[in-house]
Amino acid sequence: MNDKPIIIGVAGGTGSGKTTVTRTICEQFENTSILMLEQDSYYKDQSHIPFEERLNTNYDHPLAFDHDLLRDHLKSLSQRQPVEKPVYNYELHTRSNETIKIDPQEVIILEGILVLEDERLRNMMDIKVFVDTDADIRIIRRMMRDIKERGRTIESVMDQYINVVRPMHLQFVEPAKRYADIIIPEGGQNHVAIDLLSTKVKSIIDQKQI
């Protein structure tokens, strides 16, 4: 029996439906221990930077993430060792002093816009997934989320999308699609693709148990 957990990377643009796809897969394996690991938890610590400068952080750029720590945590989880996942404080734009203890599981799903952009992370994955959703749908979803959940104005959301989110998507997110083993159009609404992915995961689990 191969005791190494299965690592699945789920990438895609903002508002593409990555989280919906991930949660749907988790629901397919109620009897299997599954861990969701969000790339957003691994934004770099910025406590050494003045607050005014933190406000200019580009959260859609690869350099915003502490991929060294994320990779170390994936390695530890693969070796069946627990980790202390960081907690990011979006109000202070830096990492919180708190952490969350994460125990290893049979399946680890790493979800985030740039999880396929980093070659070292890709090399640790058994399955690489890209959730591909049209830009107009993604911006509408992001706008609804930011206005409802984060109290932002339509103007601020659109300004950020045009000047930061869209350029970063075209430069880093979209090109990473070529590394995907599976591309899921329209995100969580594509039940056929999700069922096929779940079947593939189950076959890998069965093989590891032999």
Image (cartoon, rainbow, N blue to C red):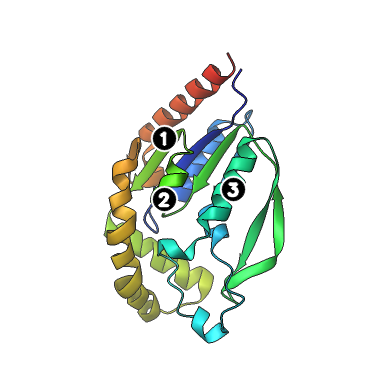
Q: Is residue 210 left or right of residue 21?
A: right
* Quadrant that contains the C terminus: top right
Look at 51% across and 55% down and name the residue there: 67
The residue indicated by pointer 1 is: 194
The residue indicated by pointer 3 is: 72
Q: Secondary structure at mark 2?
A: loop
Image quadrant where residue 160 sits: bottom left
Q: Secondary structure at mark 1?
A: helix
**Separation of marks 3 and 2 at Cα, in angstroms:** 14 Å
> Could you say where residue 73 lies in the image, as x and y percent from the top left?
61, 47
Task: Name the kind of residue labelled 3 in the image.
Answer: Asp
Let me know if residue 67 appears in the view. yes
Task: Name the kind of residue labelled 1 in the image.
Answer: Ile
Question: Looking at this rendering, what residue extends furthest in the top direction?
Answer: 210
* Quadrant that contains the N terminus: top right
The residue indicated by pointer 2 is: 118
The image shows residue 180, relative to residue 196, as above or below, that is: below
Look at 32% across and 49% down and name the residue there: 176
Kindly identify which numbered label has been placed on residue 95.
none
N-term-proximal mark, 1 vs 3: 3
Task: Name the kind of residue labelled 2 in the image.
Answer: Asp
**Separation of marks 1 and 2 at Cα, in angstroms:** 24 Å
The image shows residue 206, relative to residue 195, as above or below, that is: above
N-term-proximal mark, 1 vs 2: 2
Local crowd size for mark 2, using a 10 Å CA cut-off: few (<14), some (14–19), many (≥20): some
> Could you say where residue 167 lies in the image, as x and y percent from the top left?
29, 67
